[in-house]
Image: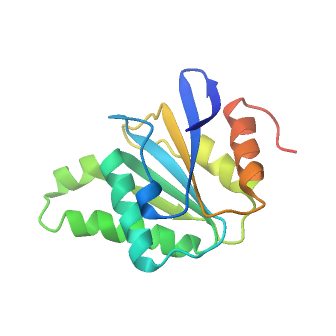
Amino acid sequence: MNLLAENEGKIYGAIAIDAPGDFSSPFSGALFPCMIWDHDGRLTDAQRSEVANLLLDAGCRYAVCGGHNCEAWHDAVDQEFVRRRPDDLDTTWDAAHVMTTWHEDENPDDVAFFFVLNTNFDDHAFEHYLVVHVGDGHTKEQVNAAVRRYAFNEQAI
């Protein structure tokens, strides 16, 4: 994991994957929001679903999706969450609920702002934040820098 920031008891990290098998959670046992930034849009629906399952298994409770195919990433996380819970009661469903958003045509700074400052919900006050870079692209450092700025309460550029 690339440590982006550590501030006020919160840890912000980033990992890069090219395929679902590359994913490994750096936050063993901790619940966290993740920002999935797809740099090149080359993963298939099945691969996105596989990554979504891995994220849910790892403790992801909020998926903020940006970059290429961000709506498809959002849908993959939602669908995998629902698929896992066909018979859950409302109380069980609510306790494990996963929030998702997609940010089509939004720049890294706007998505990072949302990710760092707007992903706590209900009883979730997250202390671990994970950026998942999917593929490779020129915006990787932009995404990381934007998350860093907001993690340290700095102004956007």
Q: Is residue 127 above or below residue 132?
A: above
Lateral position of residue 130 relative to residue 91, left or right = right
Q: Is residue 49 above or below residue 150?
A: below
Q: Position of residue 63 (x, y in %)?
A: 48, 56
The color scheme shown is rainbow
Q: Position of residue 91 (x, y in %)?
A: 18, 50
Q: Which quarter of the image is occupied by the C terminus?
A: top right
Q: Nearer the viewer, residue 136 or 130?
A: 136
Q: Quadrant of residue 76?
A: bottom left
Q: Nearer the viewer, residue 106 or 15?
A: 15
What residue do we see at 57% from left, 70% from top? 70
What residue do we see at 71% from left, 71% from top? 105
Lateral position of residue 150 relative to residue 37, left or right = right
Q: Position of residue 147 (x, y in %)?
A: 68, 42
Q: Which quarter of the image is occupied by the N terminus?
A: top right
Count how many numbered circles sit on residues in the image. Answer: 0
What residue do we see at 43% from left, 62% from top? 20
Q: Is residue 142 above or below residue 7?
A: below
Residue lying furthest top in this view?
8
